[in-house]
Image (spheres, grey):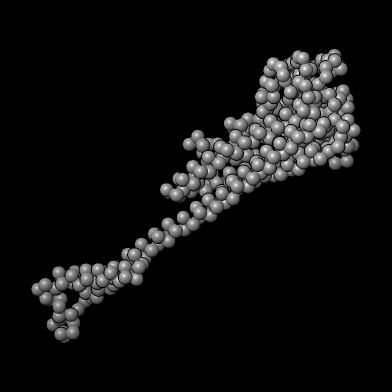
Amino acid sequence: MAKAEAVKKRAPVKTRRSPVGASPGTLIADPAARRSELRLTLISPEKFKTIDKASIDDLNTHCDNWPVVWLDCTGLANIQLIEEIGRIFNLHPLALEDVVNTGQRPKVDFFEDHAFVVMRMIDDVKVHRYEQIAVFFGRNFVVTFQEREGDPFDPVRKRIESSMPNRLRERGADYLAYALIDAIVDSYFPPIDSASELVDHIEDEMLRSPQRHQMQQLHQMRRGTNALKNVLWPLRDALATLIRSDVSYIKAETKVFLNDTLDHSIGLIELVETQRDTMTGLIEMHLSLSQARTNEIISVLTIVSAIFIPLTFIVGVWGMNFDPETSPWNMPELRAYYGYPSALAFMLVVAVSLVAFFKWKKWL
């Protein structure tokens, strides 16, 4: 039951767009967007500092004094705050427009001093909740925008807080951006593995006893698999674009790690494709099993009917209004002393003969 509850119907992702004719880079907040909160992480090889519920003043005070700055903005309701963040880090206005217009296709854009990555991430593995995340990074900063609380970045935060030697605190902003992107990609593995286990469970149940709810589960899961496929394919292309880039703020050694993340994304695509083919095969098998069961029932009913049709004919003939006194052809056996058991015995012989004939023809 718990596994069955894991398969849920997901609402389609809707992309919000600026009004027709609006100036490029116009930011329009979603009325349902969450309240914006900032978390500032200041990083150097020797130490780190985290400021929860940070403010613009914290940014202006600390950003120039630390080698790497990671600003995480949760919630996209405060357009003025997002615009101010864009001004401080010199983020391109068209990219900021894509930040607030959620539902974007995964992609990578390069600007003069920073890169912009759009992805979809799982912020709650238990309920399979997805959201858009935007990642900006340059020479000394990483800025992430999330729709709501919850993300797969806790392992990255723990690595930043761990003791030396610490690669995350030594390698710069591009490596931190890689670590965040890699965490997002790896977060897809648990739900995909859970879906694989559920598919195996459905297959075992189906082989024992095909049920209607199994078909519904498989259709819902295949819909989710198609949605994953639509996310992972452009994600793979975005990672490949990052690796092929020649911008100065992405170092060659970081591209080696990004290439590993690209391999992970390709592995996810293969897993999803395999799952989709498996579910398609199970749907076809369910239809075949249901049809075979229907044919079996129809065969049994046909055989029973074929046996009782001649018996019904015999009984019908004996049940006609004959008068043996009128003519010897009017069923003289109606007055026979053993007429009734003889008739039953004759009908039994007919039934047994039909069953033997069906077995000889291998219909039974």
Instruction: State the residue at coordinates (50%, 34%).
Output: 2
Asked where in the image residue 316 lies, by quadrant, the reply is bottom left
Q: How far across and down, in percent of the image, does residue 308 sit?
A: 29, 68
Q: How far across and down, in percent of the image, does residue 188 sit?
A: 64, 36
**Screen quadrant of the C terminus:** bottom left
Tally of numbered tags: 0
Q: How far across and down, in percent of the image, does residue 277 sit?
A: 59, 50
Instruction: State the residue at coordinates (40%, 60%).
Output: 296
Q: Locate residue 235 relative to residue 61 in the image: left or right.
A: left
Q: Locate residue 1 relative to residue 306 in the image: left or right.
A: right
User: 323 above or below 347?
Assistant: below
Instruction: State the residue at coordinates (18%, 82%).
Output: 330
Q: Locate residue 301 relative to residue 190 in the image: left or right.
A: left
Could one spot residue 162 in this view of the protein? yes
Asked where in the image residue 266 lies, by quadrant, the reply is top right
Q: How far across and down, in percent of the image, does residue 346 sit?
A: 20, 72
Judging depth in this view, the residue of 244 and 53 nearest the camera is 244
Instruction: State the residue at coordinates (15%, 85%).
Output: 328
User: 360 above or below 12?
Assistant: below
Could one spot residue 40 in this view of the protein? no
Q: Residue furthest left?
A: 337
Judging depth in this view, the residue of 221 and 142 nearest the camera is 142
Judging depth in this view, the residue of 214 and 160 nearest the camera is 160
Q: Locate residue 203 relative to residue 109 in the image: left or right.
A: left
